[in-house]
Image (cartoon, grey):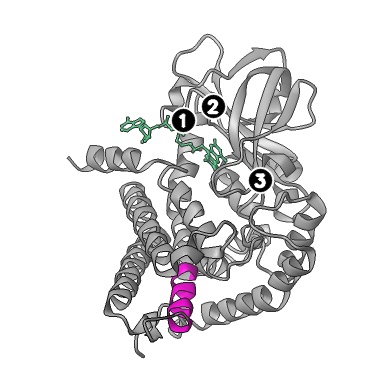
Amino acid sequence: MPYTLEPSYDDNPRLKELVERLRTYLTDELIPYERERGITAESKLDRTTLEHVWKRSAELGFYGISLPPELGGQGLHFTELCALKEELTASGAALSHSVLGDMGGPLRVGAIVKYATEQQMRRYLMPVIRGERACCFSITEQDAGSDVRRMSTTATPDGDTYVLNGHKVFSSAAPFADFAVVVARMAGSEEAYSAFLVDLDSPGCRVLEGEVPMSGQQMEGDLVFEDCRVPADNLLGEIGHGLRIGIGRITLNRLLHCPSLIGAARRAWDLSVAYSKSRVAFGQPLLALQAVQHKLADMATDLYAARSMVMATAARLDRGENIAVEANMCKLFTSEACFRVADQAVQIHGKTGLTRGHEVEQVFRTLRMFRIVTGTTEIHKNAIAKALV
Ligand SMILES: Cc1cc2nc3c(=O)[nH]c(=O)nc-3n(C[C@H](O)[C@H](O)[C@H](O)COP(=O)(O)OP(=O)(O)OC[C@H]3O[C@@H](n4cnc5c(N)ncnc54)[C@H](O)[C@@H]3O)c2cc1C
């Protein structure tokens, strides 16, 4: 088969069937649902809209599909999960983040499942997996981003509770979440951090509207804790293991963000090919110009390289290997490469690509963020060099 940028997965019948079913759901149901309601990537989303997507995706078997069968999933391999994630963003659907449960759902819970007690599973994580509750993950503070150890949110043991005080920023999904996984410093300690499951309607906890990032998506929130009491049973994992839990989750997320970026860049490529065929300049379509063909060739090559390394790393993860270094390499390369693709797409679209609200312009702003979100380019380089040199 000749190479195409839209993979067909002929070598894996289960994945091929899933991808085809996902494409049908996105094109025939989700995108028309968004159009009817005027939902765009920058819309403020309400819980009813999101729950509709969670429930429908669960009915179709997509919500939490990567979880093991005993938790209601299909135990997908990471390579298969990456393939589905790429399809979601490649579709251009504004609500694609809610189909597998990235935003507030089972994928946000992710690896923390393995630290949960039976009671925490029943009360917090299973309802998320069923699409009944939503969660966010809160580690970042205004003065503690890359340097998370600077965090000033504290947890003070008091009887059979912990008392939280502090202010978390940029928690994705917080505006519609029911609870948060919060990492806090143990009071009186310089180096011990713990993770807690915190109900967002607890006395002493407030969810504030977050800053709107350049993508225009309105999905971030701040969490403010003022003497907020959390039952001791809500400690996740052991005392002092909070950063290990948080950073372990971030390592996996660094890899799992990559296919979403590749899908968004593939969307920019599709739009660029279509535009360069239809736009006429100097008596011929743009596509006839070798300068435009070269841009498309560079874009396709970046996409192929990014996808190849992400899939190779996901395959290593499926074999149970440690991917701490490669996850950083993948996120570093993919975020830079996909941003280059988006930049070329804007260039090919000329003024159309600069027009506020055009899809290419939206993809460009979204992809720009991922050279910072879930680890900046510089932090990835630090981690790679530290591990290898
Ligand atoms: C849309 C969005 C969603 C987010 N979602 C979440 C979420 O759900 N939960 C959550 O907890 N956080 C979330 N974040 C926070 C995000 O992970 C941080 O923004 C990121 O970790 C970087 O931290 P910072 O922005 O404070 O930058 P800083 O750490 O202040 O970095 C500023 C600059 O300094 C550089 N720098 C810093 N330290 C070093 C160093 N040692 N070596 C070299 N260069 C360095 C950085 O690379 C960067 O260029 C989100 C952010 C955004 C924008």
Quadrant into which the C terminus falls? top left
- Residue at mark 1 to residue at mark 2: CA–CA distance: 6 Å
Q: Quick one: which residue is furthest to the left in this view?
A: 389
Mark 3, other Cα within 10 Å: few <14 / some 14–19 / many ≥20:
some
Magenta span dominant secondary structure: helix
Residue bearing mark 2: 141
Q: Position of residue 317 (x, y in %)?
A: 40, 58
Task: Report whether the residue tagged 1 is closer than 8 Å to ligand 1.
Answer: yes
| Precedes in sequence: disc 3 or disc 2 | 2
Range of magenta residues: 267-278
| Precedes in sequence: disc 1 or disc 3 | 1
Residue bearing mark 1: 145
Mark 1 vs mark 3: give the one in front.
3
Q: Position of residue 114 (x, y in %)?
A: 56, 45
Say which quarter of the image contains residue 124: top right
Q: Amino acid at mark 1?
A: Gly
- Residue at mark 3 to residue at mark 2: CA–CA distance: 18 Å
